[in-house]
Amino acid sequence: MTNEVLRPNLEAPDAFYAELLAAHEGLSKEESDAYNARLILLMANHIGDLQSLKRLLDEARAERI
């Protein structure tokens, strides 16, 4: 993968966000952090390309909200 999609690309972003929030319900801060780490690793595995992942890591760090 060489062209990371950095513009909004979710078919149903509000629905995904609701699912993400629901997945965290009832979790402690530590459990929520561990869940997020597992989710990130699963998504990284799905992407699979180290160069793409490095570019996304850089992009995420560059974004200041």
Image (spheres, rainbow, N blue to C red):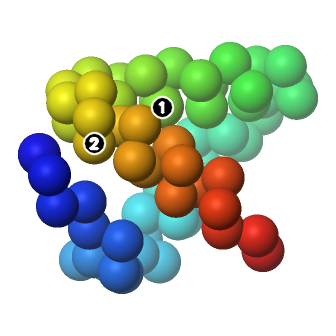
Which quadrant of the figure contains the C terminus?
A: bottom right
Q: Nearer the viewer, residue 22 or 58?
A: 58
Residue placed under numbered mark 2 in the picture:
52
Q: Amino acid at mark 2?
A: Ser
Q: Position of residue 44 (x, y in %)?
A: 34, 30
x, y percentage for residue 15?
42, 71
Whether residue 43 is visible: no
Residue at position x 43%, y 49% in the image: 56
Q: Secondary structure at mark 2?
A: helix
Residue shown at 51% from the left, 43% from the top: 57
Q: Which mark is residue 15?
A: none
Q: Is residue 35 left or right of residue 6?
A: right
User: Separation of disc 1 and disc 2 at Cα?
Assistant: 14 Å
Q: Position of residue 21 (x, y in %)?
A: 63, 54
Q: Quadrant of the N terminus?
A: top left
Q: Is residue 49 visible?
A: yes
- Residue at mark 1: 40
Query: Within 10 Å of the Cα at label 1, are there few (<14), some (14-19), or many (20+) other Cα atoms?
Result: few
Q: Residues within 10 Å of mark 2 (few under 14, many from 20)?
A: some
